[in-house]
């Protein structure tokens, strides 16, 4: 005679099932339902909860999938040669770098501007467009789109400055200064109101670069807080002479020599005080790759020692 038998199944999974039903293995045995705890393992975290169902003879446990928060739309910014905006003096290669938040593997990128290429996912947080040749003033834009939607349209304007500019006149030619020693002249415009940067080039020993900016009529102070810094562009620094003056091609010193730097690798001019700025006035930053003004030997040994000039606002 067979008695009531209880079969104990192996449990290999790990939420809890409160009831298990056992069917008799032999005729005459009694079906038994007993409480039994069974762990259901979810090591991947795919289930937010479990829903019991089915029948007493065929119970089920359904995984309710966990949901992940949808990121917001991307927010983007963009720079050209690490600047926004950027001014260049001649046709040159420009590197665009866009950085966006909330990007994921589904993110796509849309670019505009001559030379820029549209890219698709997977979408990292930064996209780079390198070595774009810019030969005319161009506004580049980028927009990133994820599952939540498109980002803002970020833009950067690259301005090709070949002289001229509102209220500043045309290109400057310093040939009357020393036509034998200097044969090349470049005129660069800087924006005092917003601050900005400009790139010279080509800039060798026989070149004179004149950077020009115009102060607003409403300039409230003597220019305190404005500063002009000059550094090398994609090369080693060389000694140069730089003079800030209201006259183009001027390499003379004022009494305090605050407008004159000679032999410096990275000259910096802090305006105000001994070097005040007057309202509604055009200033010229006259520059040569010579350590002793417009006399003596040149310091540029590569043929082009271009510089980048940054006029920072207070």
Image: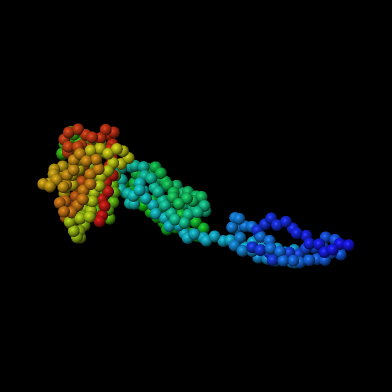
Q: Is residue 311 above or below residue 294?
A: below
* Camera-side residue of 76 and 258: 258
Name the image quarter holding residue 262. top left
x and y percentages locating residue 142 in the rendered image: 42, 53
State the residue at coordinates (78%, 60%): 7
Task: List the single residue furthest toward the left.
Answer: 255
Can residue 253 be seen by looking at this rendering?
yes
What colouring does the structure picture have? Answer: rainbow
x and y percentages locating residue 120 in the rendered image: 50, 50
State the residue at coordinates (51%, 58%): 147
Left or right of residue 42, residue 87 in this image:
left
* Camera-side residue of 273 and 116: 273
Q: Is residue 201 above or below residue 22?
A: above
Q: Quadrant of the C terminus?
A: bottom left
Q: Quadrant of the N terminus?
A: bottom right
Name the image quarter holding residue 215. bottom left
Left or right of residue 24, residue 271 in this image:
left
State the residue at coordinates (31%, 38%): 235
Left or right of residue 301, residue 244 in this image:
left
State the residue at coordinates (34%, 42%): 92
x and y percentages locating residue 245 in the rendered image: 16, 47
Q: How many marks?
A: 0
* Camera-side residue of 102 and 95: 102
Can residue 172 be seen by looking at this rendering?
no
* Camera-side residue of 138 and 242: 242
């Amino acid at each position: 005679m067979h008695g009531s038998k209880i079969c104990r199944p192996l449990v290999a999974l790990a939420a809890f099932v409160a009831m298990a039903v056992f069917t008799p293995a032999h005729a005459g045995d009694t079906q038994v339902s007993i409480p039994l705890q069974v762990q259901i393992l979810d090591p991947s975290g795919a289930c937010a909860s479990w829903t019991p169902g089915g029948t007493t003879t065929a119970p089920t446990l359904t995984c309710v999938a966990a949901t992940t928060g949808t990121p917001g739309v991307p927010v983007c910014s963009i720079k050209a040669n690490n600047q926004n905006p950027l001014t260049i003096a001649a046709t040159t290669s420009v590197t665009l770098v866009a950085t966006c938040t909330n990007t994921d593997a589904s993110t796509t990128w849309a670019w505009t501007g001559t030379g820029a290429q549209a890219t698709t996912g997977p979408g990292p947080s930064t996209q780079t467009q390198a070595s774009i040749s810019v030969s005319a003033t161009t506004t580049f834009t980028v927009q990133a789109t994820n599952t939540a939607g498109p980002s803002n349209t970020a833009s950067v304007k690259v301005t090709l400055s070949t002289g001229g500019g509102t209220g500043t006149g045309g290109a400057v030619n310093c040939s009357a200064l020393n036509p034998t020693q200097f044969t090349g002249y470049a005129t660069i415009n800087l924006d005092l109101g917003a601050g900005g940067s400009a790139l010279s080039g080509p800039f060798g020993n026989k070149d004179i670069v004149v950077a020009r900016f115009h102060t607003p009529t409403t300039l409230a102070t003597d220019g305190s807080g404005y500063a002009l810094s000059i550094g090398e562009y994609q090369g080693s620094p060389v000694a140069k002479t730089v003079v800030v003056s209201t006259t183009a091609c001027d390499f003379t010193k004022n009494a305090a020599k605050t407008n004159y730097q000679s032999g410096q690798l990275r000259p910096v001019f802090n305006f105000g005080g001994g070097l005040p700025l007057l309202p509604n006035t055009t200033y010229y930053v006259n520059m040569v790759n010579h350590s002793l003004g417009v006399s003596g030997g040149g310091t540029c040994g590569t043929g082009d020692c271009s510089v980048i000039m940054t006029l920072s606002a207070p």
